[in-house]
């Protein structure tokens, strides 16, 4: 069968982000998505109203059912929501229930693009740091990078996360709205090995970070080298955002939903 990616992610009822974004992006990468649902959120494409996290035991049971059944070639995590869920995922790696050689893409979700807390940031940050040694790639936005590293300078922060155990860091500047084009920097073992410049498109997008990380995970499952997976994801995500759907076309401030089925 197609290479399998196991995702730990939450349900977004609007379908813009979360597990639906993971399924669609991984499908477009050529791989097959499986899901361990970590939370049910109450959100629209524009706003988060609340969420209820799944118990760590339930998330673990979902994950082990997949791991016992299918040949998982990559892992991706998005919204984990609680320190218990982060600790559970850490234990799956530490106890080698998940093979430590399996590529793992960590999207360290702290706050949704559409606003609203997805858990207490300080406790989530401390828990995420325990996952870093198992991480092939971490894909923080600028807020998440600064929170996780404690550094304001993005390059210093990326090097620090590598020093704390992450194999690679993809620095995304899309949240720095005072900049022009979006620059992304890929650090592997503390050294910058790739820089890409993406056009900053008009509007804000709901689920772009989920989509990018999941597409990379899919390409890693397909056997791509990390740099190749990142480059492929850059091209793909740009096209999905260019073709994004506008739920509220008369509201220029409303978030758009990436069209992950666009042909390019």
Image (cartoon, rainbow, N blue to C red):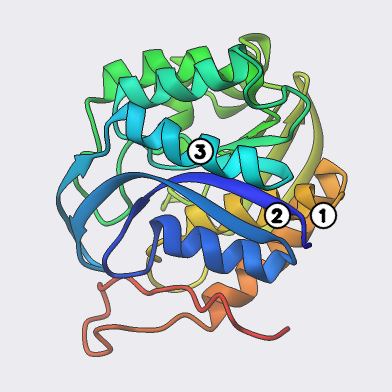
Position of residue 150 relative to residue 52, above or below, is above
Percent x, y of residue 258? 47, 73
For this rendering, which residue is in front, 222 or 259?
Answer: 222
Residue on which the image places disc 2: 218
Which label lies toward us, 1 or 3? Answer: 3
For this rendering, which residue is in front, 73 or 260?
Answer: 73
In the image, what residue occupies the spot 56% across and 54% down?
34
Instruction: Report crowding for label 1: few under 14, some 14 to 19, many 20 or more residues within 10 A (C-alpha).
Output: many
Residue on which the image places disc 1: 222
Q: Determine the CA span between mark 3 and mark 2.
A: 17 Å
In the image, what residue occupies the spot 61% across and 20% down?
93
Residue on which the image places disc 3: 63
Position of residue 109 relative to residue 133, above or below, is below
Q: Secondary structure at mark 1?
A: loop
- Residue 81: which quarter of the image? top left
Position of residue 57 relative to residue 232, above or below, is above
Q: Secondary structure at mark 2?
A: helix
In the image, what residue occupies the spot 65% across and 13% down?
165
- Residue 80: which quarter of the image? top left
Percent x, y of residue 113? 33, 53
Which label lies toward us, 3 or 2? Answer: 3
Q: Quadrant of the N terminus?
A: bottom right
Residues tagged 1 and 2 counted as in contact (Cβ below 8 A): yes
In the image, what residue occupies the spot 61% across and 10% down?
164
Q: Quadrant of the C terminus?
A: bottom right
Residue 140 visible in the snapshot: no
Q: Determine the CA span between mark 1 and mark 3.
A: 20 Å
């Amino acid at each position: 069968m197609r290479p399998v990616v196991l995702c730990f992610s939450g349900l977004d009822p609007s379908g813009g982000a979360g597990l639906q974004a993971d399924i669609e992006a991984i499908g477009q990468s050529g791989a097959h998505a499986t899901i361990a649902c970590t939370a049910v959120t109450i959100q629209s494409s524009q706003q988060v109203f609340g969420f209820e996290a799944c118990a760590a035991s339930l998330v673990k049971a979902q994950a082990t059912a997949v791991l016992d059944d299918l040949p998982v070639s990559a892992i991706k995590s998005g919204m984990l929501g609680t320190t218990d869920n982060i600790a559970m995922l850490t234990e799956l790696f530490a106890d080698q229930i998940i093979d430590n050689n399996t590529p793992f893409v960590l999207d360290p979700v702290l706050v949704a693009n559409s606003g609203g807390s997805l858990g207490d940031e300080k406790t989530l940050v401390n828990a995420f740091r325990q996952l870093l040694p198992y991480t092939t790639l971490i894909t923080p936005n600028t807020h998440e990078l600064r929170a996780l590293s404690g550094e304001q300078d993005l390059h210093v922060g990326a090097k620090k996360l590598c020093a704390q155990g992450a194999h690679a860091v993809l620095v995304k500047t899309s949240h720095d709205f005072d900049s022009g084009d979006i620059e992304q920097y890929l650090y592997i073992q503390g050294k910058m090995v790739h820089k890409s410049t993406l056009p900053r498109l008009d509007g804000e997008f709901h689920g772009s970070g989920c989509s990018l990380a999941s597409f990379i995970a899919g390409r890693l499952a397909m056997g791509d080298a990390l740099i190749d997976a990142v480059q492929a994801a850059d091209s793909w995500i740009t096209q999905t955002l260019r073709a994004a759907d506008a739920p509220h076309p008369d509201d220029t401030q409303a978030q758009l939903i990436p069209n992950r089925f666009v042909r390019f």
